[in-house]
Amino acid sequence: VFIVGFIAAMAYSTFGNNGFRCEVCMTYNGRTICRNGAGANQEAAERVARDGACTDLTHGMTELVQCQNSQAKVTWK
């Protein structure tokens, strides 16, 4: 379910109204990854970037949720 939602969010951010763009840097278990996101509003743009970074940092749903709920460094472009 998460993967389908993530793909839908990525497709929307790619083809939809991308009025907001940001870079989100997530740190989880001592590793840091930064990802870009775009969306129709700030929340959508940040969610796409946060989900992309956490997907690369984690293994399994429990870690993914923990990562998504952790503090992020957001830079708006």
Image: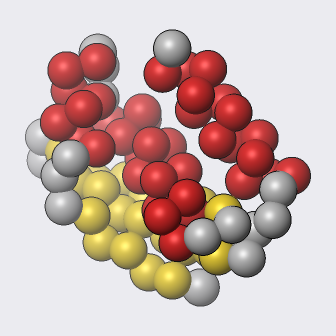
With respect to residue 65, does 59 lie above or below?
Answer: above
Q: Residue at x 49, y 43 (%)?
A: 52
The picture quadrant where one finds residue 63 is top left
Q: Position of residue 1 (x, y in %)?
A: 51, 14
Q: Position of residue 34 (x, y in %)?
A: 43, 59
With respect to residue 67, does 77 lie above or below?
Answer: below
Q: Residue at x 28, y 30 (%)?
A: 64
Q: Residue at x 73, y 76 (%)?
A: 19
Q: Position of residue 17 (x, y in %)?
A: 81, 65
Colour option used = secondary structure
Horizontal side of 71 relative to 74 (left or right) equals left
With respect to residue 64, does 72 lie above or below?
Answer: below
Closer to us: 47 or 73: 47
Q: Is residue 38 visible?
A: no
Horizontal side of 36 relative to 30 (left or right) equals right
The outermost residue toward the left is 29
Which quadrant of the figure contains the C terminus? bottom right
Closer to us: 23 or 20: 20
Tell how many labels.
0
Q: Is residue 9 visible?
A: yes
Q: Residue at x 47, y 53 (%)?
A: 47
The picture quadrant where one finds residue 54 is top left
Q: Position of residue 55 (x, y in %)?
A: 42, 33
The picture quadrant where one finds residue 58 is top left
Horizontal side of 3 relative to 71 (left or right) equals right
The outermost residue toward the right is 15
Horizontal side of 7 relative to 74 (left or right) equals right
